[in-house]
Amino acid sequence: MTTVAELPAGFADKVTAAQSTFRAVMDAMARPGRICKVAAALPAPAPLMPAVAAIALTLFDHDTPIWLDAAVVRHREVGQWLKFHCSAPVVEEASVASFALVADPARMPALDCFALGSNDYPDRSTTLILQVASLTDGAPLELSGPGIRGTTALAATVSADLIAQLALNRELFPRGVDLVLVAGDEVVALPRSTRITAKGG
């Protein structure tokens, strides 16, 4: 069993690092498809990526229930690390989570299994943080919608099934989930308002 002393450290300068990470995530949300670097990315227990660790320490707290996929749950030290640094409660039901950490997107539940919010309270939905192999080496996608002038391109390594689910998710607006894709220390946001199609499709 991993002791507290053996857990990876958090931010060296908590306030500055959290502010920097928050700005990076908000910038990504405001400009869907734009790759943003998380300068405060830090080591964390496997399989968490550096930017995911920084996002967790910035956005998670005792009021934000989080859901972990099986690939994360298998590594018990991740739960210990999150509890020690964030005090965020881990929940088993995806439908009540404020955030979801997904290390293996190919095996995650369907998007409609997560909290979708309501017309009156669309903010009561889940933000999914998905780790992907690359933000630049996948099949080309075309994005449009709020925060995008005309269209923009993205080539993240996400499945065709997820793209199809995101199309249905957009139809629920203002309800629906938001996605943050992470590769290493970089992030891209796909808010529920973004239209995503296979390029040329």
Image (cartoon, rainbow, N blue to C red):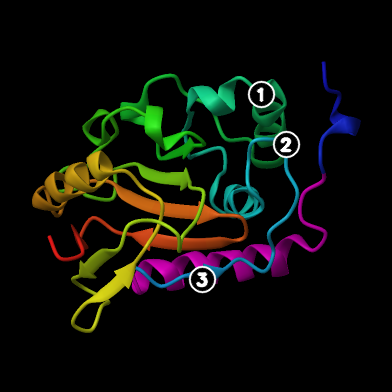
Tell me where the magenta segment starts and ends, as one range.
9-32
Query: Which residue is at the far left?
Result: 171
Q: Residue at x 54, y 26 (%)?
A: 71
Tell me the SS state at disc 1: loop
Quarter-of-image position of residue 95: top left
Of the residues under marks 1 and 2, which one precedes in the sequence?
A: 2
Q: Is residue 23 on the magenta stretch?
A: yes
Of the residues under marks 3 and 2, which one precedes in the sequence?
A: 3
Picture layout, residue 181 above or below residue 46: below
Q: Position of residue 185 (x, y in %)?
A: 62, 60
**Which residue is more in the foreground, 71 or 19?**
71
Dots 1, 2 in contact, CB < 8 A: yes
Mark drawn on residue 36: 3
Give the residue type at disc 1: His
Dots 3, 1 in contact, CB < 8 A: no
Q: Position of residue 106 (x, y in %)?
A: 39, 33
Q: Residue at x 21, y 49 (%)?
A: 122
Query: Which residue is at the far right?
Result: 5
Q: Is residue 34 left or right of residue 117?
A: right
